[in-house]
Image (cartoon, rainbow, N blue to C red):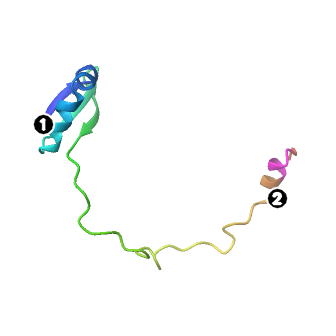
Amino acid sequence: MKTTNIHEAKTHLSRLVERAAQGEEIIIAKAGKPMAKLVPYRPSKEPRQPGAWRGKVKMSDDFDEIPEEFEALLRGESI
């Protein structure tokens, strides 16, 4: 794994992207502190299936109700 500073990354971005595409992970640091990681892109193997969260998420019956105090603030009234 290669570590490079931001200035070098900006100067040699194309070269670093090529290295990442070949499988190398590159850490980009600022003042010696790791800030980001450049990794190879790997597309997902399976297409997403619609409805995968069906039955797993529940919403309260009053989900879209706004408390009166909040409505008053939205109208510019003080409470």
Q: As drawn, is 5 to the left or to the right of 66? A: left
Q: Residue 42 bears which disc, if any?
A: none
At 44% from the left edge and 76% from the top edge, which residue is drawn? 51
At 31% from the left edge and 69% from the top edge, which residue is drawn? 47
**Secondary-structure class at tag 1:** loop
Which numbered disc flags the more N-terminal residue, 2 or 1?
A: 1
Q: As drawn, is 38 to the left or to the right of 22? A: right
Q: Name the residue tied to disc 1.
A: 1
| Front-lying residue, 56 or 39 | 39
The image shows a total of numbered marks equal to: 2
**Secondary-structure class at tag 2:** helix
| Front-lying residue, 6 or 21 | 21
In the picture shown, does residue 21 fall above or below 62?
above
Residue type marked 2: Glu
Residue type marked 1: Met
| Mark 2 burial class by Cα count in 10 Å: few <14, some 14-19, many 20+ | few
Residue 49 lies, in percent from the top left, at 37, 74
On the image, which quarter does residue 23 sit in?
top left
Q: Magenta stretch mostly in which secondary structure?
A: helix
Q: Which residues are magenta?
A: 72-76
Q: Residue 68 bears which disc, if any?
A: 2
